[in-house]
Image: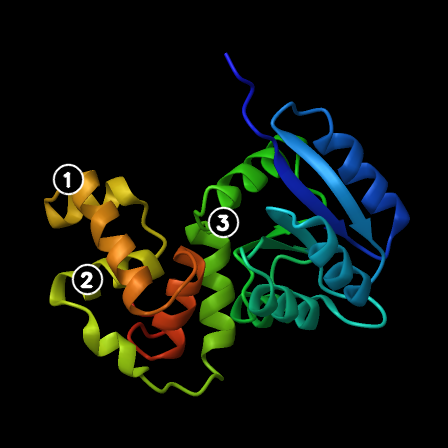
Amino acid sequence: MTAPIPIRVLIADDDEIVRAGFSALLETRDDIAVVGTARDGQDAVRAAGAHRPDVVLMDVRMPVLDGIAATRRITTTLVPVPRVIVLTTFDLDEYVYDALSAGASGFLLKDVPATTLFDAVRVVARGDALLTPDVTRRLIDEFARVRPRVRPERLTQLTAREVDVLRMLAAGHSNPEIAARLYISNETVKTHVSSILAKIDARDRTQAVITAYESGLVRPGAP
């Protein structure tokens, strides 16, 4: 049996200890390979272009070019687009929402257990969003309040059922939960999600959720 191709990871953090620690942890997994590290945002953009990682672990606060600007450059200039996981010290870091808007697929606290780190890399590598209802909903509720809400024209392309599915995605529901609430199959949910991403030009579920909040389709704090 042919061994699966490992997930290529780039680690960007201005703290050498963090870079070394995450590298050592990730290299213990057979399905993950660290292809490079970067000490600042500018270095991260350069390294991402050179190594073409599948996933970038990106610190928010770095010198020369911060993690938000680096994330935006990476997600708008590279093809295929690497998935970016933002690293932060605080679960409600004021910069995390901006990073998600810039194209990140999720965020992690730097003190996460090793198993959570491994799972996060695998989740975003396969195109899923690194979203949990408790932390992410609080984050978006907090910072979406001050964002202008202009409904993008592409939202008008969604069917009524797709709007329902997008609202549930924004509430943090998983595919099985959406299927149960709408009385449809998991496969039908997957089909709706794929259609939603294509119609609103979102790379993954995280970006779909951001669009739902920023457009006003979902209001912060709404049930």
The residue drawn where x is 72% and y is 49% is 51
Dot 2 falls on a residue whose secondary structure is helix
Nearer the observer, 38 or 217: 38
User: N-terminal of the two: label 1 or label 3?
Assistant: 3
Q: Secondary structure at mark 3?
A: loop
Q: Which residue is mark 1?
A: 185
Q: Position of residue 144 (x, y in %)?
A: 46, 76
Q: Under tag 1, what secondary structure?
A: loop
The answer to which image quadrant residue 168 occupies is: bottom left
Q: Which residue is mark 2?
A: 162
Q: Is residue 155 visible?
A: yes
**Looking at the image, which residue sits at the far right?**
16
Marks 2/3: CA–CA distance: 21 Å
Q: Amino acid at mark 1?
A: Ser
Could you say which quadrant of the image residue 221 lies in? Answer: bottom left
Q: Position of residue 91 (x, y in %)?
A: 62, 57
* Residue at image point 19% right, 62% down: 162
